Image (cartoon, helix red, strand yellow):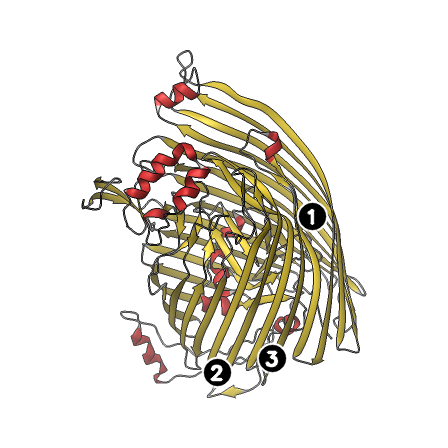
């Protein structure tokens, strides 16, 4: 029978004792390919299948894998568009952080705004933006992490990754209308196990990750520890020298000194206790912490790049007319240098996060009662940057955010996979409090005297905000299978949101009477409070004519919560309405020829009301607008072929078309009807060829392509289509393996995001290469 929505792991059985087989021949000579690396020949391993049980047959004296992962079978019979990567596939694809996942999943893109602290997930055009709740959620071991810092963090000690596309409001506790990225880490068992990985590469990259799990009391109590440390030099070059930044075409720039201000370093760790006192109850306690120093913002001059757009100048002048002459000069006097910047102030970006969670499962006669409780604290303190982007010390931006989230999810779900009736019903509640201090520091005395009477430079123009957001919801997701072939799934969700914003705008700086600093009130403080009620539902029909083939069609409604813009002093412009979307999708899933060929294909059409769009009022104030109607359509394809046991060929592709049907921009007073929705790549393609044999040789080559993506609602600023090539070669033994890798082999220069109201864009990573050594404990 179909298991439609099993999303939590169960107790693992006591591991079986497996005999080890020794094998030694000339295959060890392959190690010569790794220059200067000497490894002692080790016994070729017996290899576990994904379920933890060995395959019975042997080939050439080696125990080989091949048994189908049970979770893969469940996904094949689940009427939802889901991509899954198991532990081996995560390693093969080189996924080390959340920003690597989208490259392996169709219709999933990650928008990096120049800092880890402002990263947004985008699935099928449903994307998060500043000030709003994430449209695509990250769930780690059953705990939703809904701050932007969590969306771009380091990964280590992983079991698997699953990406759900489309609204998941009725399936998970926390509502996510675009989709869910669900990550599970290695759960401790009676078998002591661990792994340590060293990764060194160009740009002085150094990464070390480790995990270790072991029992404390056999069959009762287990512990796990995991951690990662990472450091690399920056990709940007901040240049000092003659003719910078105003060199003319006939002047040859002279670089005297350069720094690499966007270097990143950080540490993350996790401690886990897993308690199973009997066959009925289990508890999973986790404490995790992360701390990162990401240097300056990863921003470059868009107009000075290879894909410059003269029309973008007009858009920038409209968004910031007071700055138009400077922007025009930047365009005329540009320097065509990839990843070169000319800043007087390099800035920094510091963030810490701490999560405390407890998950429990109580096994009842016909169901499981599960709960997840968590406390999440996140601090951005601070982000600082050169906000005029020149060598003249005029303005600096400073951003500080501190948030605390408490959440609780409790639900009852069926545990009999053979029963035609499967159900899940739960209650989710959360309370998030966020304090934001966003400032622009003015450092020119003449400007300060004119605009802030009585104060002297440097004076900080501050927007101070406190946001409170409370949510409580009841959700259910149920299915019934008729005659083992036809299944109907029904889901519903009722939610209430109470939110409040308190805002004040003031200037703080030294004065003649008080050199330590005086305060000037710039606008009247205000407070806004709103309450919203949401009611959404979902219905899916699926048909399974044979074991490995399924057709499905479904209709669902999703939503993204209402919210507030926190850097605007006009109360009527601060609030924005919830985003509501209705989607119809249909798909097919199949596997044939003894799992040597697999295919998943889904088409979708979405109508969205009050679509969230961010807009710059000026260089220091932004608001979220609601586009009245947006339509989004597209498809996603995933397929693989195994022509023989050592070789796998994979192809995935996604296409998304988003159109503003009705959108009157009230800031620019312009109509954008018929324009493409910005920050949605038109397509993405991944194809790979992978080879792994019984002697330990591993090869993988990847081709990744991303289509055009608009950065502005008028479609004049955009990223050109691009492709990158990745390669990976390795030699794998039982306990020790080594790999050489290169990403962006063709060293393509491309953009991933753009800052509205400026000409600053975020470039993708250049060519990187390195060496990875992994030892299994």
Q: Nearer the viewer, mark 2 or mark 3?
A: 3
Label 1 residue SS? strand
Q: Is residue 202 left or right of residue 78?
A: left
> Looking at the image, which is closer to me, 163 or 728?
163
For residue 689, side relative to residue 358 (left or right): left
In the displayed orientation, state which residue is furthest to the top: 513
Instruction: Give the residue drawn at x 59%, y 34%.
Output: 573
**Residue placed at 72% from the left, 72% from the top?**
542
Residue 476: tell me if it is visible: no
Q: Residue 512's mark? A: none
Image quadrant where residue 406 sits: top right
Q: Position of residue 177 (x, y in %)?
A: 64, 54
Q: Position of residue 711 (x, y in %)?
A: 46, 50
Residue lying farthest to the bottom in this orientation: 60
Please indicate whether residue 357 sits to the left or right of residue 329 in the image: right
- Tell me if mark 3 has few (under 14), some (14-19) or many (20+) residues whose alpha carbon lies within 10 angstroms of its own: many
Which residue lies under the disc numbered 1? 408
User: Residue 451 falls in which quadrant of the image?
Assistant: top left
**Which one is in front in this view, the residue at disc 2 or the one at disc 1?**
1
Q: How crowded is the residue under tag 1: few (<14 C-alpha within 10 Å), some, or many (20+)?
A: many
- Give the CA distance from mark 2 to mark 1: 48 Å
Specify which label sits upstream in the sequence, 2 or 3: 2
N-terminal label among 2 and 1: 2
Residue at label 3? 591
Q: Which residue is mark 2?
A: 21
In the rendered view of the protein, which quadrant contains the N terminus?
A: bottom right
Q: Nearer the viewer, residue 672 or 737?
A: 672
Q: Is residue 112 left or right of residue 389?
A: right
Q: Secondary structure at mark 3?
A: strand
Q: Residues within 10 Å of mark 2 (few under 14, many from 20)?
A: few
Q: Are marks 2 and 1 in contact (CB under 8 Å)?
A: no
Considering the numbered disc 2 on the image, is that residue within a helix, a strand or a loop? loop
């Amino acid at each position: 029978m179909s298991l439609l929505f099993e999303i939590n792991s169960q107790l693992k059985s006591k591991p079986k004792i497996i005999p080890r087989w020794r094998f030694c021949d000339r295959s060890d000579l392959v190690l010569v390919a790794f220059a200067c690396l000497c490894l002692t020949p080790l016994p070729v391993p017996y290899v576990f299948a994904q379920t933890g049980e060995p395959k019975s047959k042997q080939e050439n004296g080696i125990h080989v894998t091949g048994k189908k992962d049970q979770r893969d079978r469940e996904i094949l019979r689940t009427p939802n568009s889901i991509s899954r990567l198991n532990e081996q596939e995560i390693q093969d694809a080189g996924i080390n952080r959340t920003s690597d996942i989208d490259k392996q999943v169709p219709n999933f893109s990650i928008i990096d705004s120049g800092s880890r602290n402002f990263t947004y997930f985008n699935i099928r055009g449903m994307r998060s933006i500043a000030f709003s709740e994430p449209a695509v959620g990250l769930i780690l071991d059953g705990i939703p992490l809904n701050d932007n810092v969590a969306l771009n963090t380091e990964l280590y000690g992983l079991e698997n990754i699953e990406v759900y596309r489309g609204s998941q409001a009725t399936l998970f506790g926390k509502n996510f209308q675009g989709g869910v990225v669900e990550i599970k880490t290695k759960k401790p068992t009676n078998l002591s196990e661990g792994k340590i990985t060293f990764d060194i590469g160009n740009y002085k990259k150094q990464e070390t990750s480790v995990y270790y799990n072991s029992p404390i009391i056999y069959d009762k109590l287990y512990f796990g520890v995991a951690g990662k440390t990472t450091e690399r030099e920056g990709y940007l070059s901040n240049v000092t020298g003659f003719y910078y930044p105003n060199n003319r075409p006939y002047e040859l720039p002279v670089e005297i000194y350069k720094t690499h201000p966007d270097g990143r370093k950080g540490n993350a760790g996790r401690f886990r206790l897993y308690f199973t006192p009997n066959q009925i109850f289990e508890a999973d306690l986790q404490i995790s912490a992360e701390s990162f120093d990401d240097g300056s913002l990863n921003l470059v001059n868009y107009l000075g790049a290879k894909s410059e757009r003269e029309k973008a100048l007009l858009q920038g002048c409209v968004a910031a007319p007071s700055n138009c002459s400077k922007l025009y000069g930047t365009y005329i006097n540009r320097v065509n240098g990839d990843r070169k910047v000319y800043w007087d102030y390099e800035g920094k970006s510091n963030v810490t996060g701490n999560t405390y969670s407890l998950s429990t499962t109580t096994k009842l006669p016909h169901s499981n009662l599960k709960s997840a409780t968590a406390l999440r604290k996140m601090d951005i303190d601070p982000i600082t940057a050169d906000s005029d982007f020149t060598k003249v010390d005029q303005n600096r931006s400073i951003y500080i955010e501190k948030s605390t989230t408490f959440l609780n999810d409790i639900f009852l779900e069926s545990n009999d996979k053979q029963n035609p009736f499967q159900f899940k019903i739960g209650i989710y509640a959360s309370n998030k409090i966020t304090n934001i201090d966003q400032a622009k520091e003015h450092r020119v005395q003449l400007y300060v005297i004119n605009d802030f009477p009585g104060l002297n430079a440097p004076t900080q123009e501050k927007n101070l905000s406190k946001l409170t957001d409370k949510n409580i919801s009841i959700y259910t997701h149920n299915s019934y299978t008729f005659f083992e072939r036809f299944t109907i799934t029904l889901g519903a969700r009722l939610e209430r949101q109470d939110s409040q914003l308190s805002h004040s705008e003031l200037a703080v700086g030294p004065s003649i009477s008080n050199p330590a600093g005086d305060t000037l009130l710039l606008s009247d403080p205000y407070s806004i409070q709103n309450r919203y009620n949401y009611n959404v539902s979902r219905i899916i029909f699926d048909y399974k004519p044979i074991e490995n083939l399924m057709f499905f069609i479904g209709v669902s409604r999703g939503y993204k919560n209402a919210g507030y813009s926190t850097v605007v002093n006009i109360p009527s412009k601060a609030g924005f309405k919830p985003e509501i979307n209705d989607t119809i999708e249909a798909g097919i899933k199949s596997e044939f020829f003894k799992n040597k060929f697999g295919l998943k294909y889904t088409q979708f059409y979405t109508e969205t009301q009050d679509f969230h769009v961010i807009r710059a009022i000026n260089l220091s104030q932004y608001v979220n607008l609601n586009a009245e109607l947006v339509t989004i359509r597209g498809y996603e394809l995933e397929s693989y072929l195994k022509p023989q046991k050592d070789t796998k060929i994979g192809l995935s592709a996604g296409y998304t078309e988003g159109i503003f049907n009705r959108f009157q921009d009230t800031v620019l007073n312009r109509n954008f009807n018929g324009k493409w929705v910005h920050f949605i790549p038109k397509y993405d393609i991944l194809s790979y060829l992978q080879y792994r044999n019984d002697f330990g040789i591993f090869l993988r080559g990847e081709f990744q392509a991303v289509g055009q993506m608009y950065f502005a609602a008028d479609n004049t600023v955009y990223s050109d289509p691009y492709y990158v090539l990745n390669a990976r070669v390795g030699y794998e033994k039982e306990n020790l393996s080594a790999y050489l890798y290169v990403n962006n082999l063709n060293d393509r220069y491309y953009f991933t995001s753009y800052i509205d109201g400026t000409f600053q864009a975020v470039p993708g990573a250049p060519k990187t290469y390195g060496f990875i050594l992994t030892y299994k404990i």
